[in-house]
Amino acid sequence: MNFATLPLSPQMLQTIESLGYKEMTPIQAQSLPSILEGRDIIAQAKTGSGKTAAFGIGLLHHLNVKKFRVQSLVLCPTRELADQVAKELRRLARFQHNIKILMLSGGESFGRQLGSLAHQAHIIVGTPGRVLKHLNKESLELSNLNTLVFDEADRMLDMGFIEEIESVLAFVPKERQTLLFSATYDDEILQISKRIQNNALHVKTAAQEVQNKIVQEFYETNDKVDTLIKILANYKPENVIVFTNTKLEAKELAESLVQNKIDALAIHGDLEQYERNDVLVQFANKSCPVLVATDVAARGLDIKDLSMVVNYDLPHSMETYTHRIGRTGRAGAEGIAVTLYNEYEAQKIEPYEEDEKHVFLDASALKKEQGFEMKPQYVTLVIEGGKKDKIRAGDILGALTGDAGLQGSSIGKIDLYDRQSYVAIENSLIDEAYKKLKNGKIKNRKFSVWVL
């Protein structure tokens, strides 16, 4: 765990020590030796894990300071993260004079960035949209690049940057080291890794490799709505899928929850495709905490970090039960699966009683919490313009963080469709964002905007 075990220069080791790094964090210990060897890495790493120092030490180690060309590019989802990364890299770069690190992100003067790029730089830290704009204008040239870093890759995908990333890749040399850091490790991230990396080493720290754990609780009750509300009040999950067996029940249950100040939407087979899109986008981008769904409507639905699953109705088979509850407790997180049944369904419970993982509890012991409500973290803004209008996620982000003055951290997931775009905005800022976008422009064009 000691940095001195790595083949680093004495000057860099001295700088690392002066910055207060006593020993390597797990992500650094598992990735740095291979990064220094020039291997591609895909690492699961959250904020605060020491990932910036992991890739920062690596790219500074490989840097040829005498060669005044861009040798490393670090892509980040937001301006705030890019700023943090650039500051950390500058601290690590103190061991060597004349290392130039330049930040390129939206919300900053393009002309000033052009001036800085005219004098070249060793390392670029930026957001995909702004970096691509400089590449297209030929103010940024990457033929000498040897290290490409994707920081918080999952967040970049959530914000709709896949097209920008694909476009940036067209400008970088095929022979390069590619480092991909992501807080989640799902199929989409793994597929991207296969496409853009060469024989990448997979790194997960021991703490993140804990087996998925799902708490499975069963409650007998004659008032399922009341029991469900008490369970939500007790656990306060961030997001929940509640499964019903019929379309009508899904619709009626969602309405009952809304009447009880719990923000809920229903998805079932009677919805038009555009209605289905509206519902799924809002649930996936945290603009609605509770989704009431039938099994058929929920097929193909992949929601990251799902806190809880509730079987409002008993599934028709054990296979369906396993499929439903398997949506929670992913990526090492602890999930909760709750099943409700009434006296008429009690006879169907026997197969579940045979599994010792299933805990049977008394619904009458659940206490009611006065004033309990579930409100979303975000609200969804819809823009009447999308891929066919040549709108990219970076254009929307630029309009919101530039003229509208919002922080990148206040903007959640961005979903782009052919003729519409959906943007999750922090609840308290939705009115401000709506007014600014309604009266402002995206790519010098006006678009209709409304709140879902």
Image: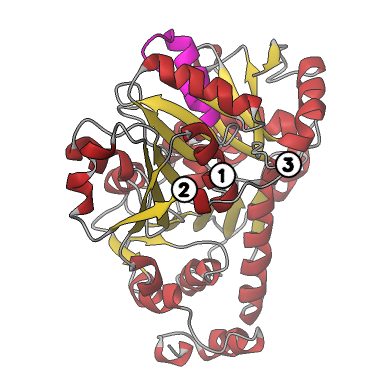
Secondary structure under tag 2 reads helix
Residue at 50%, 49% in the rendered image: 364
The image position of residue 177, as x and y in percent, is 37, 59
Residue contact between numbered discs 1 and 2, judged by CB atoms under 8 Å: yes
Residue type at the position of mark 3: Gly
Q: Return the residue at label 1.
A: 230
Range covered by the magenta-colored residues? 266-283
Mark 3 or mark 2: which comes first in sequence? 2
Residue type at the position of mark 1: Lys
Residue at 29%, 34% in the rendered image: 345
Please, what is the dominant secondary structure of the magenta stretch?
A: helix
The image position of residue 36, as x and y in percent, is 38, 74
Q: Return the residue at label 3.
A: 371
Q: Return the residue at label 2.
A: 363
Q: CA distance from mark 3 to mark 1?
A: 12 Å
Q: CA distance from mark 1 to mark 2?
A: 9 Å
Above-or-below relation of 137 to 41: above
Secondary structure under tag 3 reads loop
The image position of residue 132, as x and y in percent, is 55, 36
* Residue 371 located left or right of residue 305: right
Residue at 72%, 17% in the rendered image: 444
Asked whether the viewer can see residue 416, the reply is no
Asked whether the viewer can see residue 423, the reply is yes
Residue type at the position of mark 2: Ala
